[in-house]
Image (tube, helix red, strand yellow):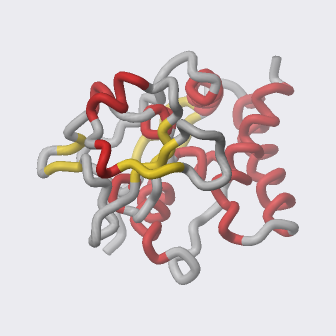
Amino acid sequence: MTQSPLPAGEFSTWLAEFARALKGEQASTVPCGTCTACCSSSQFVHVDPDETDTLRHIPAALLFAAPGLPDGHLVMGYDENGRCPMLGDHGCSIYDHRPRTCRTYDCRVLAAAGVEIDPAAEPHKAAIGAQARRWRFTYATPEAEAAHDAARARARHDLEDKPPHTVTAVAISSVLVGQTHQK
């Protein structure tokens, strides 16, 4: 069953907001609706030591030392079904206090870069890939459309040299490079 396309917003506006979110200047404003694909995809959620409000809202038993990072950096795992343990029947149970990782996550970056999650290689992320394929950007100017085309070209080039598990990293770097060149 094919689901209908979703409006991702105007590309240049989205790109500027996404860059600000990654810098910690604001949260991502993803129009998720009822989608919980990222919350149900067997992902570890990083929590920085400075996220004291978040840490007060996550039971300590759900947090573990983040491998390879300095003391104080933690990760929250997922349950036996691949769901975030803070995801309740009606969405995130700590939404106003969610980790920075969740505040900045935006699956539209995959659509912006024109990259796909391979469900055979990452079956636990298939729902994110399906959601990302639905996003459709609009363009206020021909330059905005050209910037989007350039981001997709960079991502295609970068993926030729990178293993599939770095699809999200490639997507982020391909759209941010274009953002810095637009200024």
Q: Is residue 135 something that shows in the picture?
A: no
**Residue drawn at the location 59% of the way across and 39% of the way down:** 71
In the rendered view, does 91 fall on the left or right side of 116? left
On screen, 43 above or below 139? below
Comparing 118 with 133, the one in front is 118
Relative to 74, is 147 above or below?
A: above
Q: Which of 142 and 132 is in front in this view?
A: 132
Where residue 96 sits in the image (x, y, percent)?
28, 25
Picture quadrant where residue 175 is located: top right
Q: Is residue 57 above or below residue 13?
A: below
User: Relative to the observer, which residue lies in front, 53 or 41?
Assistant: 53
160 sits to left or right of 107? right
Please tell me which residue lies in front, 162 or 52: 52
Query: Residue visible at 87% across and 67% down?
Result: 161
Q: Quadrant of residue 178?
A: top right
Q: Residue furthest toward the left?
A: 89
Query: x and y percent of residue 48 in the render?
Result: 52, 33
Image location (x, y in percent) of residue 73: 55, 40
Query: Which residue extends farthest front?
Result: 71
Give the residue at x 73% y 53%: 170
Left or right position of 65 against 156: left
Q: Could one spot residue 146 in this view of the protein?
A: yes
Location of the N terminus by quadrant is bottom left
